[in-house]
Image (cartoon, rainbow, N blue to C red):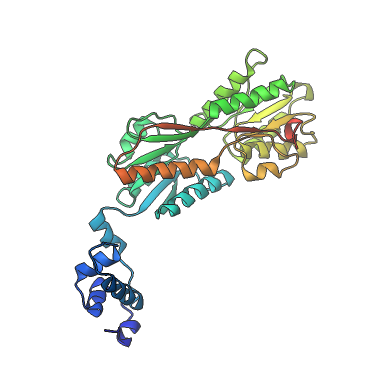
Amino acid sequence: MAPTSENKMTATPATIKDVARVAGVSVATVSRALNGAENVLPHTRQRILDVARELRYSPSGAARSLITRRTDTVGALLPDLHGEFFSELIRGIDQAARARGLHLLLSSSHDDADEAAAALRAMNGRVDGLLVMSPHADDDFLFQNLPRNLPAVLLNSGVRSPTQAVFAVDNFGGARVMTEHLVGSGRRRIAFLGGPAANFEARERERGYRAGLGAVAQPWLLEGDFSEGGGQRAGAALLALPPQQRPDAVFAANDIMAIGLLGTLLAGGLRIPEDIALTGFDDIPIARYVSPALTTMRVPIAALGGQALEALAQALDRDSVDATTTVMPVQLVVRRSCGAGG
């Protein structure tokens, strides 16, 4: 039985009952056919698919969720959505989600604990699982705000949980290698431009910096906040010092601060790396294009997001999270900002 022009022209969306009526089968048969069940004859399945296409029938996600108890959507809570680091991270998460047939719901806490808590609560019931990257996500915060039965994977977190998987980068090891590289190149007054005091990654990178100095030099800490403006403010403070009181190298705890610092020092008449060597951490795409190109520690940013999403998808498949910690390796990339490289 062919669909009528009235069916095609109606402004009301077609329902599963409309498909069943036009195809001459039961609603249950339509449901089985559209969900890929094997107990539907091939010619019946094809007729149902043809009718559904003609009627432009779109299955209700809400109705399917009531049956399967799945939304086929995962959430990602990030501290920010701005900048190249988060763009790369989201790209990795999104590619892995699409490969799994999952939709992605993004939320940013803007580095605010109350907003992070509200975002976690708002996602309850809307997503099947969560990726959580937040400087506020310690044990107490997760206990208070993460729904008990919602699978979660933590990113760049110091939490070691028996119920959540954790994916992190080797912040400590990478920072130690970077500092040792600067020491090995003859630098002795090496300042560290840190991140927010409460941030786990910032603390680990500072710890690696201190370890890399060893007994060769004293720590020299500059206050930063992981933003370009933080790098600019640090640059202005260094320019205000007499030349003989400035460091001969600055290791910025992330690239975007290093880039803000680089622009300020160059505008102030300093030469990089002749007057001050400069390095960063992350290897965001722009790091290779600034002049001089930035020496940095390469983080597999997209892979971090992709592997975390895949771990979450596997947890959803088996209804349990493999509560392990995965540390992603990092790689020193030497460029001209520290006096070597291409």
Residue 246 spot, x, y in % from top left:
74, 24
Specify the quadrant that holds the N terminus: bottom left
Residue 108 spot, x, y in % from top left:
46, 46
- Whether residue 42 sits left or right of residue 114 in the image: it is left
Specify the quadrant that holds the C terminus: top right
Residue appearing at x 33%, y 40% in the figure:
146
Residue 118 visible to the viewer = no
Residue 121, relative to residue 167: is it above or below? Answer: below
Residue 270 spot, x, y in % from top left:
79, 33
- Whether residue 164 sits left or right of residue 30 in the image: it is right
Residue 216 spot, x, y in % from top left:
67, 14
Residue appearing at x 29%, y 50% in the figure:
125
Q: Residue furthest front?
A: 42
In depth, the one of 58 and 156 nearer the eye is 58
Residue 51, relative to residue 31: is it above or below? Answer: below
Residue 294, relative to residue 218: is it above or below? Answer: below
In depth, the one of 98 and 10 nearer the eye is 98
- Whether residue 206 sits left or right of residue 18 in the image: it is right
Total count of labels: 0
Residue 245 visible to the viewer = yes
Within the image, what quadrant is residue 2 found in? bottom left
In depth, the one of 329 and 228 nearer the eye is 329
Within the image, what quadrant is residue 286 found in? top right
Residue appearing at x 29%, y 62% in the figure:
35
Residue appearing at x 61%, y 42% in the figure:
284
- Whether residue 125 sits left or right of residue 156 in the image: it is left
Within the image, what quadrant is residue 187 found in? top right
